[in-house]
């Protein structure tokens, strides 16, 4: 009995020391209890100081910039929420089983878009607002692909008006590829379409939305990110998420990161680049997109983060984990705040 108590005391002490280390390094765990059947997939700022975190089984919480949580009732809680974007008036939500929703911030009412019947097995994996065109771009493919299950991808790119008056307008479809990510830069739309070995980067003018191939990148691009008019990307060297990551810039450097697993997303924060990976690390990247250092936060994937200001960001990931990262600048490079 005494040995049992000592072992458990040691485990508790190690856990406290681990949490203290993270706290000292500028990471505050908001939701640290592991939920094996639920994960956050996305976080998005819906209004100043207000953020929505969303994921499996209709998981939807609002969090403020102090870390206070409020549960949001999603109209179809059996669906997995994959992506959230918003403007000053509405929040748009993409799910599996062909679910596309809007939430009016003024009336607090939900509206569901009408989509083709054959979208029942598809998911809306990424959403992109085109404010100049009053339209919402959407992309994805077969929902099993989003879960890492091999099947016919059924990829597509489409758009719809922000009021959901129209039917979904399909601009591109390819049954042999999945369109993981969309991004916008200088009047052009970029899309990352993966067909099993390489990712085709497609491009279209936001005026005509006619997509054509621009370039090919080895590996699976999971995320596109605009910065300074250029398009950056992150992902995995193959469909095996646990092995090697990739990071790069269209027309610029391409880095294969051996042993880092999939780099789910990258963003700029405090003047530098940060990446989140399969193994629960925050990667600090140089301007040439090489890994300068990493901070191990949790044992499982951190999927997405949303900057709060120039040195803070909210992060979400596997097992319904949420956390706040606090950084500061040191000689033009990011370091973790003590």
Image (spheres, rainbow, N blue to C red):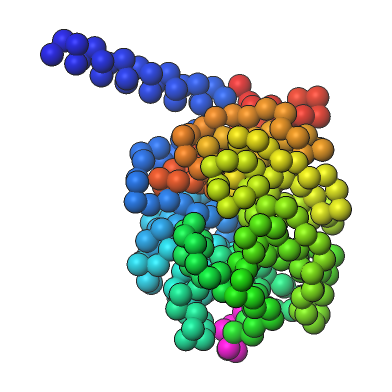
Can you see residue 252? Answer: yes
Looking at the image, which residue is at 65% across and 62% down? 194
Q: Which residue is most to the front?
A: 197
Along the line of sight, which residue is nearer the eye, 139 or 111? 139
Along the line of sight, which residue is nearer the eye, 202 or 127? 202
Q: Percent position (x, y) of residue 125?
A: 56, 65
117 lies left or right of 199 = left
Q: Which residue is most to the bottom?
A: 166
76 lies left or right of 215 = left
Along the line of sight, which residue is nearer the eye, 89 or 133? 133
Looking at the image, is 263 positioned above or below residue 74? above
State how many labels appear.
0
Q: Percent position (x, y) of residue 57?
A: 37, 61
22 lies left or right of 331 = left
Q: Quadrant of residue 285?
A: top right
Looking at the image, is 39 positioned above or below residue 215? above
| Residue 59, magenta (yes or no) | no
Q: Percent position (x, y) of residue 169?
A: 64, 85
Q: Percent position (x, y) of residue 266?
A: 67, 46
Quadrant of image for the N terminus: top left
Q: What is the chief secondary structure element of the magenta stretch?
A: loop
Can you see residue 265? Answer: no
Q: What residue span does the magenta drawing correspond to?
A: 162-167
Looking at the image, which residue is at 79% across and 74% down? 212
């Amino acid at each position: 009995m005494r040995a049992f108590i000592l072992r458990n005391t040691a485990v508790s002490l190690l856990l406290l020391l681990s949490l203290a280390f993270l706290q000292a390094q500028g990471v505050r765990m908001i939701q640290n209890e592991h939920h094996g059947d639920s994960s956050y997939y996305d976080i998005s700022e819906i209004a100043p100081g207000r953020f929505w975190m969303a994921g499996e089984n209709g998981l939807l919480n609002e969090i403020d910039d102090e870390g206070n949580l409020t549960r949001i009732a999603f109209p179809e809680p059996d669906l997995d929420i994959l992506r959230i974007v918003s403007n000053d008036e509405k929040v748009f939500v993409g799910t599996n089983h062909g679910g596309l929703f809007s939430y009016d911030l003024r009336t607090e009412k939900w509206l569901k878009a009408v989509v083709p019947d054959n979208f029942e097995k598809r998911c809306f994996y990424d959403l992109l607002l085109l404010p100049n065109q009053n339209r919402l771009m959407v992309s994805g493919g077969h929902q099993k692909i989003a879960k890492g299950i091999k099947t016919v991808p059924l990829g597509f790119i489409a758009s719809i008006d922000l009021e959901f008056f129209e039917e979904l307008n399909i601009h591109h479809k390819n049954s042999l590829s999945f369109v993981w990510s969309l991004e916008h830069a200088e009047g052009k739309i970029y899309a990352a379409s993966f067909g099993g070995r390489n990712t085709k980067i497609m491009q279209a003018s936001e005026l005509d939305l006619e997509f054509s191939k621009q370039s090919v990148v080895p590996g699976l691009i999971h995320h596109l990110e605009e910065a300074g008019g250029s398009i950056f990307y992150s992902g995995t060297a193959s469909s095996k998420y646990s092995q090697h990551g990739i990071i790069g810039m269209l027309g610029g450097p391409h880095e294969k990161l051996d042993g880092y697993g999939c780099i789910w997303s990258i963003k700029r924060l405090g003047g530098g680049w940060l990446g989140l990976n399969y193994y629960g690390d925050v990667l600090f990247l140089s301007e040439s997109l090489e890994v300068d250092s990493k901070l191990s936060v949790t044992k499982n994937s951190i999927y997405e983060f949303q900057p709060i200001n120039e040195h803070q960001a909210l992060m979400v990931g596997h097992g319904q984990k949420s956390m706040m990262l606090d950084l500061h600048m040191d000689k033009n490079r990011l370091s973790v705040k003590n």
